[in-house]
Amino acid sequence: MGINQVTAKQKLSTLTRHPGSLFMLIVTILAAVITIGSLGFLVFYILINGVPHLKPELFAWTYNSDNVSMMPAIINTILMVILTLLAAVPLGVFAAIYLVEYAGTGNKLVQVVRVTAETLTGIPSIVYGLFGMLFFVGYCNWGYSLLSGSLTLAIMVLPVIMRTTEEALMAVPKSFREGSFGLGAGKLRTVFVVVLPSAVPGILSGVILATGRIVGESAAVIYTAGTMAKVPSNIFSSVRTLAVHMYRLSNEGLHTDSAFATSVVLLIVVIGINMLSNLVARKLVKK
């Protein structure tokens, strides 16, 4: 009898003697199976309905009512992600650095900021869209544009980036800081040379979550960036992202097959961004 079999029998015997543990194990396994099964069903449903309708005309450079090309939407999505992250990541990371490294322990301001960030994380995206429409589109007079949409999305994902960065910084052992101080390094040098590189994997996980929300967002983008299906000439041009493009096609009811094909590309884009982020994180950790 192998060691694995003995261990399995011991675990089964222990679970049998404790019905509560056995019940929790069954519930946990059932929840995992339901989650994985639901996710697998959604992915296969999208692929089965979308892959057969991927055609070359869907990737034409110019959109029209005949080819309903998604190429402008793909380019707009990439531009939206880049501009949003350029605005949100520095603000979120530096805010988290201040809260963890510089704000005193038990500071009431820190507690207020944390509660506010957690509250903002749960606000529906359409509320951000209405705010962006009133402030960026109307008050700032930028109109429905790439800039209005990216800044609105930056405000929307900022709490996520800030909170994940804060948790990543707090997870760095205090011995790293003490060792750096013992070698004569100052506070600023310790933060940016020792602490921040150690927290990079956690920070990138927040960036990945933010990127997924940016790519899949439609309500906030419709109210701020518009629905113009063309490659923008500048940051004040109206744009249509992949999520909005898919929504418009499915809403019209005339190009449902193209909407499924767009969902396949959207899925590939999200997976590609996640894989690229994980690759960058692994390389940074090795360094």
Image (cartoon, helix red, strand yellow):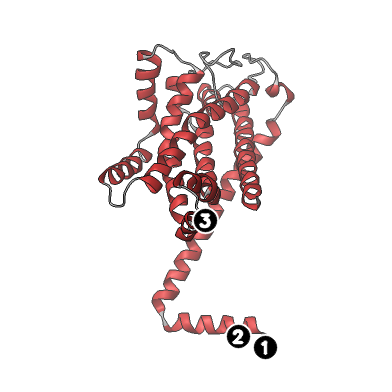
| Labels 1 & 2 near each other (Cβ < 8 A) | yes
Amino acid identity at mark 3: Leu
Q: Position of residue 59 (x, y in %)?
A: 69, 23
Q: Where does the image place residue 268, in percent across and percent down from the top left?
A: 64, 38
Q: Nearer the N terminus, badge 1 or badge 3?
A: 1
Mark 3: few, some, or many residues within 10 Å (few <14, many ≥20)?
Answer: few
Name, please, the residue furthest toward the front.
184
Residue 196 seen in render: yes
Query: Which residue is tagged 2?
Result: 6
Query: Disc 2 to disc 3, how far (Cα)?
Result: 51 Å
- Percent across and percent down for residue 49 are 63, 37
Q: Furthest residue to the bottom?
A: 1
Task: Give the numbered dot on residue 270.
Answer: none
Which numbered dot is residue 183?
Answer: 3
Q: Nearer the viewer, residue 129 or 100?
A: 100
Secondary structure, mark 2, is: helix
